[in-house]
Amino acid sequence: MRTQATLNFTTPRNPAAPQGILFFEPARDAAPVGDLPRYHAHGRAALANALDEGLMADEVEQILDGRKIVDAFPVWRGESPADYAARAVAEMFVAYLQ
């Protein structure tokens, strides 16, 4: 079964951009019944980081629009909670400004 493919990603600014990997399988697997949902630590870290960076709780709710943080801003495969929190909050600020 083919699970990944090479994606040649070039941009107008950087035609020599490095190649990336595109995963066809979801990075998130179902958690066993009774366990905390997968990426629970990632979501908690992102929420704490968002509040520490100055977003208000109602602003975070507005950005998420009823979704979980990890659903609105998916976790990348192998991403640590701290790395995810920094990236997700940056994406939240972009979404908030739009």
Image (cartoon, rainbow, N blue to C red):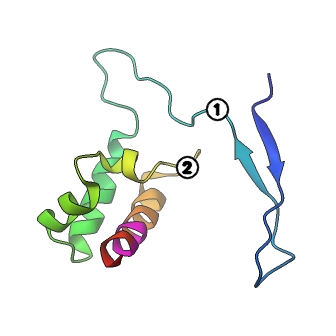
Q: Please provide percent x and percent y for residue 82.
A: 42, 59
Q: Which residue is mark 2?
A: 76
- From where the camera sits, is residue 42 visible? no
Name the residue rendered at 33%, 30% in the picture. Answer: 37
Camera-near label (1 vs 2) is 1
Name the residue rendered at 22%, 47% in the picture. Answer: 66
Q: Does 85 sit left or right of 83 as displayed? A: left
Decide: few, some or many residues near mark 1? Use Cα within 10 Å; few <14, some 14-19, many ≥20. few
Question: Total number of numbered labels?
Answer: 2
Quick check: is 40 in the magenta stretch?
no
Q: Which residue is mark 1?
A: 25
Measured in 3D between alpha carbons, the distance from the residue under mark 1 to the one under mark 2, in whole angstroms, is 12 Å
Q: Which label's residue is closer to the chain start, 1 or 2?
A: 1
Check the image and report above or below for 65 versus 55: above
What range is drawn magenta here? Answer: 90-94
Name the residue rendered at 38%, 47% in the picture. Answer: 70
Q: Please provide percent x and percent y for residue 46.
A: 33, 58
Nearer to me, 72 or 44:
72
Q: Please provide percent x and percent y for residue 7.
A: 80, 53
The C terminus sits in image quarter: bottom left
Check the image and report above or below for 41 versus 86: above
Q: Residue furthest bottom?
A: 13
Q: Amino acid at mark 2?
A: Trp
Q: Amino acid at mark 1?
A: Glu
Q: Does 89 sit left or right of 77 as displayed? A: left
Q: Does 69 sit left or right of 88 as displayed? A: left
Decide: few, some or many residues near mark 2? Use Cα within 10 Å; few <14, some 14-19, many ≥20. few
Name the residue rendered at 55%, 49% in the picture. Answer: 76
Majority SS type along the magenta span: helix
